[in-house]
């Protein structure tokens, strides 16, 4: 899902363009190449185009873990997921626009309740995603024109697959808020997990900030008037992973400049007028060393 869209949809006061649209942002993330030591795990390639996503490696997949390699241009993440019984793609795509563009609470609630989101990455990203059960899945992008056409595929019976080594953990928790590592190496793999006990989707955005920046300073920017240019605490260096549902997790390979980062999620809360989670507590400082 395109974070920029979600953020714009969520709260008009957010100074978001500076945060997520800075041209230097994606250029600094250089995920390491896929490790061949995980040979038993299948690899899915998602190529993001102007109109959607093209998948390779999805034939004969089994439930369990798969490597994900995302190629293409831009900063739009690919979203993988499946819909609960009785919830059609047509209803879902309507709800995406009503919920995340028009900020309709009922649509956001329906998406949270009836979607099983398993993550995704932006072009240049690598990591792993987990198909929790056999069934039909899809991948799509959510751009300015709304959701793309879904690339659909079928996943068969579960196969055991080893979880990769991780260097840190970023855990979305009730509150909403963040739990997990306060420091991680500047290059490695982190686990991104949604440990919420209620049905809610979370994504994660890591944005480098000037050393010593406080949560209050970043919040003040989000709550203040929209300004031109990046906020005073902004530093080039960021990455994002796409939404995951309750109990789901993925791993994300990353290679970022060492320093201080703010961890953010901007998914809207339907009970709070669509307030982005960052303004409700999903904002935390960590260090990459
Ligand atoms: Cu969230």
Image (cartoon, grey):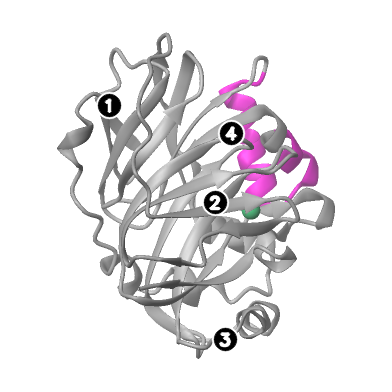
Q: What element carries label 3?
A: loop
* Residue 177 in the image, given as x and y percentages of width and height: 68, 59
Separation of marks 4 and 3 at Cα, in angstroms: 32 Å
Q: Quadrant of the C terminus?
A: bottom left
Of marks 2 and 3, the one in the foreground: 2
Asked if the residues shown at circle 2 and circle 3 are in contact, with their CB atoms under 8 angstroms apart, the answer is no
Separation of marks 1 and 2 at Cα, in angstroms: 24 Å
Taking the spot 79% from the left edge, 46% from the top edge, the residue there is 105
Label 4 or label 3, whichever comes before in sequence order: 4
Of marks 4 and 1, the one in the foreground: 1
Residue segment shown in magenta: 87-110
Separation of marks 4 and 1 at Cα, in angstroms: 31 Å
Q: What element carries label 2?
A: strand
Residue 183 visible in image: yes
Label 1 or label 2, whichever comes before in sequence order: 1
Main SS, magenta region, reads helix
Q: Give the side of residue 175 with respect to residue 192, left or right.
A: right
Separation of marks 4 and 2 at Cα, in angstroms: 19 Å
Taking the spot 25% from the left edge, 56% from the top edge, the residue there is 31
* Residue 257 in the image, given as x and y percentages of width and height: 30, 74
Q: What element carries label 4?
A: helix
Which residue in the structure is indicated by mark 4? 93
Relative depth, front residue between 277 and 215: 215
Relative depth, front residue between 255 and 38: 38
Which residue in the structure is indicated by mark 2? 203
Which residue in the structure is indicated by mark 3? 227
In the rendered image, the vertical position of residue 217 relative to residue 242, given as above or below: below
């Amino acid at each position: 899902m395109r974070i920029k869209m979600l953020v714009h949809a969520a709260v008009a006061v957010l100074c978001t363009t500076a945060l997520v649209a800075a041209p230097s942002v994606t250029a600094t993330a250089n995920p390491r190449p896929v490790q061949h030591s995980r040979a038993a795990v299948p690899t899915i390639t998602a190529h993001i185009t102007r109109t959607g996503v093209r998948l390779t490696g999805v034939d004969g997949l089994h439930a369990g873990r798969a490597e994900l390699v995302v190629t293409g241009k831009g900063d739009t993440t690919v979203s993988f997921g499946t819909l609960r019984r009785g919830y059609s793609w047509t209803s879902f795509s309507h709800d995406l626009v009503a919920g995340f563009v028009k900020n309709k609470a009922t649509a956001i609630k329906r998406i949270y309740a009836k979607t099983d989101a398993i993550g995704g990455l932006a072009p240049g990203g690598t990591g792993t995603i987990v198909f929790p059960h056999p069934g039909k899945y899809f991948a799509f992008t959510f751009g300015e024109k709304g959701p793309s056409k879904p690339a659909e595929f079928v996943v068969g019976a579960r196969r055991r697959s080893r979880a990769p080594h991780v260097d840190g953990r970023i855990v979305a928790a009730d509150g909403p808020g963040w739990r997990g590592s306060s420091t991680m190496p500047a290059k490695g793999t982190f686990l991104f997990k949604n440990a919420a006990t209620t049905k809610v989707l979370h994504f994660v955005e890591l944005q480098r900030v000037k050393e010593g920046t406080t949560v209050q300073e970043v919040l003040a920017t989000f709550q203040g008037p929209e300004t031109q240019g990046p906020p005073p605490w902004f530093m080039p260096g960021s990455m994002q992973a796409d939404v995951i549902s309750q109990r789901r997790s993925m791993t994300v390979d990353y290679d970022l400049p060492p320093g201080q980062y703010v961890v953010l999620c901007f998914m809207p809360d339907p009970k709070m007028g669509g307030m982005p989670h960052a303004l409700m507590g999903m904002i935390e400082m960590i260090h990459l060393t």
